[in-house]
Image: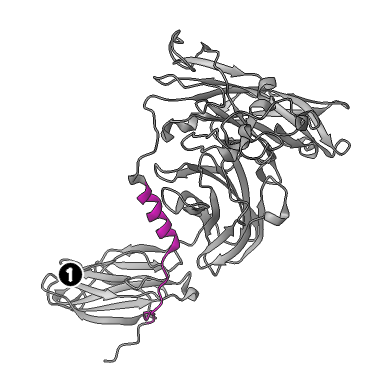
Amino acid sequence: MALPSNPFSPMLDHPRNAIATALALALAATVSAQANTIPGLDGSLTNNASPTYFGRRGAVHPNGEIGMSYSYTMCNPGSVPIQWVAPMNANHPMFAMMVVREANGRFEQITDNATTFVKHAFSAANTPSTCGGTCQTTGTGLRVNCTDTYGASTNANRHYLAPSNEINPWTGVWAPVGSYFDRGEPDVGPPLNMDGVRTLSGTAPAFTADLVKNRVTLKEQDLLAVNRKFFCCHIVVAGEDGDLHFNNLGHREFTSTWTGTTWTFANPVVFQSGSVLSKWVGATLTNARNGDDDGHFFVAVKVTPLGGGQYHYEYAVQNFDNVRGAATLRIPVCPTTPVTNVSFRDPNGNLLDDWTTSRVGAELVFTAPANNPLDWNNIYNFGFDCDVAPIAGNVVLDQARVGPGALSVAVSTQVPGGLASVTNLGPGCGSPAPVLASNGLPVIPSAGFAFTVNGSPLAPVVLYAALGASNTQVAPGCFQYVDNTFVTHGAYVSDGAGLVSAPVPIPNVLALEGTVIAWQSVEVVLGGPLLGFLALSNGVEILIACR
């Protein structure tokens, strides 16, 4: 009898699964050791408070920009002192600041990291704390179980504010030579801008002419909007183990009021540790990092049903402490899924450096221009609509720069559904009953996808497939799980161990996405429960998908 042709004939071209590759690269990075770790070193942010107005610039209210600052408190819950020497020495903590709001269905950063500079600490007061035991009375720097608080005025002092791009947030390393403090404002030029001697003065004419420059910079329009706003702080401590970085981050909700002549702020909500993205109601927050070679990305996603089978996916991605940054965000979306209303937002407001989007294979890819990667202490927003409900999956962030560790970081989160699956439809019959199983998931493409049948030795076996499932009793204890549209996929003879392998290669044909096929095998064996010579396997149903 001639058998019908295999509907899943193999094809020569089988492109690799980009998500699996990225996961493998991310896992491979864990074999390295984090550089410069000092055992027992641990800095902890325990409060930020007192947001304060420090002048404005630009157009007439409400179209100008203001300078803002606030206090923060740091504790040492570790077992060794934290070095704390003023720049131009490199051994001191640094404090990055950010302001975020919930608006337009997103959690948006409203401070541009390029204009809001990082505070370099210069001395520690060593006051008693509640972060551990008794504050040590001897030693240098921030001593064990002691705290230090820097007020808003101190943190607004431009003598100690410098760009974030000079700092490695993963290792905490900052190089004084050639730094902003070395170069001055304006840059004094060579060789003085590379001699390691401080040139910058907090009373430079550039600062007296501009009260906002380098301070936490906010547009008045952003402060006027009625929405939830948060001011955030992030401690960077050289030599702190990456597993201890999470208590370096914290936030607090605040309100803003224009009095007619100035801005006032209040912070009635208590300080909370961790990423501010945890305050996004209805969102799922996860994180991952590049092994022990580089830092973390936080990914928050909120999926909103729009009706009519449509969903809006909104992602907020925060680079917490990854020095190499991200140049692409890849979200798995099957090629046959229509994607509309694609959006991107960053805090700088420059449309000319927005990330672009493309559909590449089974992914929606957001790509940064060369001058706008997702660097640390930044939150970027990505959104789109599609007609697929969310499931658990991974997004992938490709690193923007060369350096130690993997090329990509995969973060588990919620993504549009459509996962390939294999489902058991019910038991077989026989003594013993043949067992039908797949060797994996029916992903497009899968050249090696196959079924195995484990039954009687040296027995004829026929494998059937149908586009519909059934549950029809054909003999006592025996059920047919393929409907009557079934075709013969192949006829085989089991080996001496009773095994059959039936290849079912799935080609790179995206039109197969969503196809459901039921499978069942029949074994010819003396005394079988069906007609006295047939035994039936369990039924299996596969859902073919692009991942």
- SS class of the residue under badge 1? loop
Amino acid type, residue under disc 1 in the picture: Gly
Which residue extends farthest top? 137
Q: Residue at x 47, y 32 (%)?
A: 245
- Closer to the camera in the image, 437 or 230: 230
Residue underneath mark 1: 455
Q: Position of residue 75 (x, y in %)?
A: 51, 19
Position above or below: 395 against 441: above
Q: Is residue 108 left or right of residue 261?
A: left
Q: Position of residue 139 (x, y in %)?
A: 44, 12
Q: Position of residue 415 (x, y in %)?
A: 52, 55
18 drawn magenta: yes
Q: Residue at x 40, y 20 (%)?
A: 80
- Closer to the camera in the image, 254 or 244: 244
Which residue extends farthest bottom? 1
- Closer to the camera in the image, 482 or 365: 365
Q: How many labels sit on residues?
A: 1
Is residue 538 in view from this perspective?
yes
Q: Is residue 532 left or right of residue 103?
A: left
Please state, as top left, top right, bottom left or bottom right, where the C terminus lies in the image.
bottom left
Position above or below: 420 against 203: below
Q: Local crowd at mark 1 within 10 Å, few (<14), some, or many (≥20)?
A: many
Q: Position of residue 297 (x, y in %)?
A: 51, 44
Q: Residue at x 47, y 53 (%)?
A: 394
Please state, as top left, top right, bottom left or bottom right, where the N terminus lies in the image.
bottom left
413 drawn magenta: no
Range of the magenta residues? 7-29
Is residue 163 in view from this perspective?
no
- Closer to the camera in the image, 79 or 441: 79
